[in-house]
Image: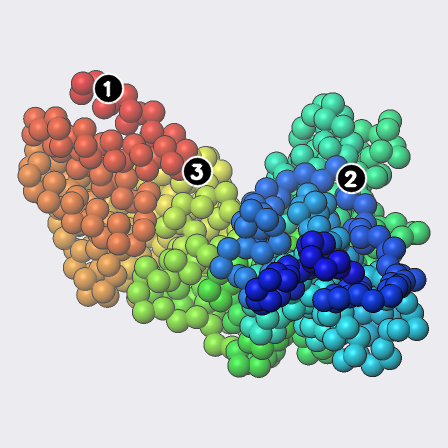
Amino acid sequence: MTDRTGRDGCGEYDPCSRRETRNTVRGSADAIVQAEAIHGGVHVTAAAHASQSTPRQLPMTPAGFVNRAAELSRLDELLSAPEGGVPEGTATSVVISAIGGAPGIGKTALAVHWAHRVRSRFDDGDLYVNMRGYGPGAHLDASEALGSLLQALGVPPERVPLDLDGRAALFRSKLDRKRVLIVIDDVVSAEQVRPLLPASPGCMVLVTSRSALPGLVAREGARRMTLSTLGAEEALALLRSAVGADRIDAEPDAARSLVAHCAHLPLALRILAERLISRPDASLRSMAEGLAAEDRRLEALGTSDDELSDVRAVFSASYTALAPDSARLFRCLGLHPGGDFGSAACAAAAGLTPREGAPLLEQLVGANMLQRIGDDRYRLHDLLRLYAVERIQEEERGEERDRALRRSVTWYLGGVRNAVRAVMPNFRSVDIPAGEPLTVDPCEFDSATAALDWFEGERTNIVAAVRMTLEQGLFELAWRLPVAAYPLFEMHRHLEEWKQIHLWGLAAARSLGDRRGEARNLLGLGDAEWLRGDLATALDHYAATLTANQSLGDGWIEGFALRQTGLIRWEQVRDGNAPALLRRAIDAFRCAGERRGEGMALLSLAECERSLGNIDQALEHCDTARAIFTEIADTWSIAWSGCSTASVLASARRHPEAVAEYRAAVEVFQGLQDRSSESVALIGTGESFFALGDMAQARMHLGAALDILRSADDPRADEIEAKIARMR
């Protein structure tokens, strides 16, 4: 109500000029009466709900919330305007942030924690509704949610419209010109949340969902934020906050094992923290041992009385929401040997074509059951992988599980064969065993660089594939994959992995009684031990190779076993029988028509002649080997013949010629990313420059070799470093 002068702040009236009357309202009012003149009494009665207090509905902030500094900062940026609520440049739109991520990743914790931090900036209150999209019980539909929110805003139940559109319109009306923070939790789709969005730019909406909600991003302009698992230090910080720093820091190694077993997943870490708190006398080591067994880990990270605090139950809610084809692909990913993979590997495992698999992968990404980590690259975090394994074991017959694993590993075997063909075209590979035809062709490579890049990206999957096929009894694949991948591991000097896959391959071959598989894996083991520096063990493996090959009469296997035996014996003790072994190797290669093996044995024989001072004979062997490699177009082997030639030339004090040979080899090895071979050529170059008296060039090349050796923890590094020091 106003008096004649209109001095209540609602309007202004000039009785002399009778100019325009301005009507403004500050604050909240349900009824306003404005009059120019009053005769008699005016009575205004407030509505029964006018005393409704400002809603403050946020649930309790998560206890011991830590980390997520980057995500909190991103949310803070949405409130850049000094008066809160509306960021600069968004005066005509509501700010919507969609927080997504895998089940148990901490979406609700982040949203509620941040909302508590900023709730004071929303003068007209905060609202919270749990849509129960993936939680226990029936989903809350938009109409039910609006009914609850309207009552929180003071609308009596009898005045809440019955239809969805009416409720949504009234909700927008109640929030008009207000600043309210709204948290809509556990949403399953954009359609479920869209009617709950206000129209007032003073409002902000936080939405959490396991779905990516692409429609909300595209149509309403929601800012998407996808959470990932915590880093190792962040996961430890969460445990320290919940359990206590003294207990966690007293057993640092066990603590790191615990967070690794939890896959750095916040829900799993909080369940683990509760277990630790309830067992104050238990050591972290004993708890880690209890979680070590993968087949019991999800059981250990569950609770019997709270479905929301059970890792398996939380995963199950998302899994059951998947379409049948997407659920089947998810199950098949449980049999993929590694944690990250490309779309072709996924399709191969499920027996799908790439076109069939692509939309299913997108559905899994959209449901945050799978994480996209790059262009055509995906990751399944460890606990979800264990859940996928459980699902395929329970929902698929044993024959189908074997077929899925066989398809996956066969695809990798085909890719490995093609990669080796691009890098070392004359290496004798192995056949792919007969089986179910692949729906996805193995990768093809147009260059050695592309092949080696692929190998490095898939190396851990290849190693895991050998282990899995051995464990599952697919022995034909388990012995073939190490043999096929041999040159790739050798070239990049992944020596420990190389040794391990041959040990698994040897076990598989012996389980089958396959002498060829046994001999090929023994030969690979010998080479791995040779490069690791364990020459005695290498010689034992080569002797076993020759024994296994007796019934085969394979000249390729015999030739390489003899060549390596002669080479080591000459390097060790200048065994006078070594040249004879090398000549036997050459004969075996020639009988088998193995040209590259013949050339490599000739280079080894050239080294013997060089050591004996027979320069002309050594150079003749090098020239013959180079001619063979040129004839068969083997670039890597041509470069090695250049290194051998350079070594002989250096012994003859023909250092300028040696430098030229070494430099040509360096260029080839760099192109093939063969760092170990590159270091050998760089050392030879540096030593030749030293012999020429060019100290600057000598130090430069030896220093480059030292960098390579140090990066690979190669024991030769100390020797080269001492040589450089003497030059100074």
| Disc with the residue nearer the chain's start (3 vs 2) | 2
* Mark 3, residue position: 532
Query: How many residues crowd mark 1 within 10 Å: few (<14), some (14–19), many (20+)?
Result: few
CA gap between label 3 and label 2 equals 51 Å
Please give the name of the residue rendered at 57% of the width and 64% of the height, measured from the top-left corner.
17
Q: In this view, does 581 lie to the left or right of 525?
A: left
| Disc with the residue nearer the chain's start (2 vs 1) | 2
Is residue 118 or residue 310 the one in the foreground?
Answer: 118
Q: Does dot 2 land on a helix, a strand or a loop?
A: loop
Q: In this view, does 635 lie to the left or right of 419?
A: left
Query: How many residues crowd mark 3 within 10 Å: few (<14), some (14–19), many (20+)?
Result: some
* Mark 1, residue position: 725
Q: Which quadrant holds residue 726? A: top left
Q: Does dot 1 land on a helix, a strand or a loop?
A: helix
Q: What residue type is labelled 3?
A: Arg
Q: Which quadrant holds residue 73? A: top right
- Classify the position of the C terminus by image quarter: top left
Task: Evaluate if marks 3 and 1 touch, with contact meaning CB atoms under 8 Å apart.
Answer: no
Q: What residue type is labelled 1?
A: Ala
Q: Does dot 3 land on a helix, a strand or a loop?
A: helix
Residue 524 in picture, x, y percent from top left? 46, 51
Q: In this view, does 21 lie to the left or right of 485?
A: right
Total residue callouts: 3
* Mark 2, residue position: 63
Residue 645 in picture, x, y percent from top left? 16, 45
Residue 1 in picture, x, y percent from top left? 78, 60
Query: How many residues crowd mark 2 within 10 Å: few (<14), some (14–19), many (20+)?
Result: few
Please give the name of the residue rendered at 22% of the width and 32% of the height, measured from the top-left corner.
702
